[in-house]
Amino acid sequence: YRFCIFQDIASAVGVQGQIFTIVNDDSYYYPDLIRGWVVDAEMGMGQDIAIYTGSTTGESRSNEICSSYSPITWQVDRKCHMISASSFDKLCYDMKMQRDDMGDDLYA
């Protein structure tokens, strides 16, 4: 029974990753990072994606101890994109506006 619960969670969990060079140029402003990664065909963002199956990460996991939530689908944008610093200012603001305020995820 326990495996079924974990498998239901694993089936609904995925990780998406994008790499950015942060620039001081608002022509690269994306205001909704809180909603997930940026897909912009004109800028080539979210277009060339590597998809693979893996496990979760963290200090409590290793090559000997896997996550109960495996397998996790990872989706990684293969390209590095420019993004404005103000996009991350907006992301931090949006994080602080969440019900749980996500304050523990913000560091100065």
Image: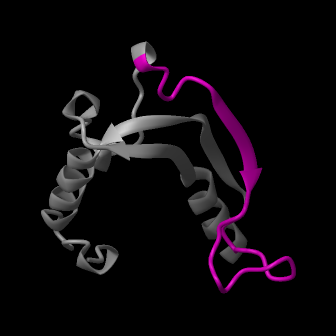
Residue 99, by quadrant, is bottom left
Residue 33, by quadrant, is top left
Residue 104 horizontal/vertical position (percent): 30, 81
29 is higher (above) or lower (below) than 69: above
24 is higher (above) or lower (below) than 54: above
Judge from the rendering whether residue 90 lies leftward or rightward of residue 3; answer left or right.
Answer: left
Residue 90 horizontal/vertical position (percent): 18, 51
What number of labels is visible? 0
Viewer-side residue, 15 vs 19: 19
Locate the C terminus by quadrant.
bottom left
Residue 29 horizontal/vertical position (percent): 24, 35
Give the residue at x 55% y 55%: 13
73 is higher (above) or lower (below) than 82: below
Judged from this view, the residue extending furthest toward the bottom is 60
48 is higher (above) or lower (below) than 95: above
Viewer-side residue, 45 vs 57: 45
Instruction: Examine the residues drawn in magenta and state their main secondary structure.
Output: loop
Viewer-side residue, 99 vs 57: 57
Give the residue at x 62% y 52%: 11
Residue 19 covered by magenta stretch: no
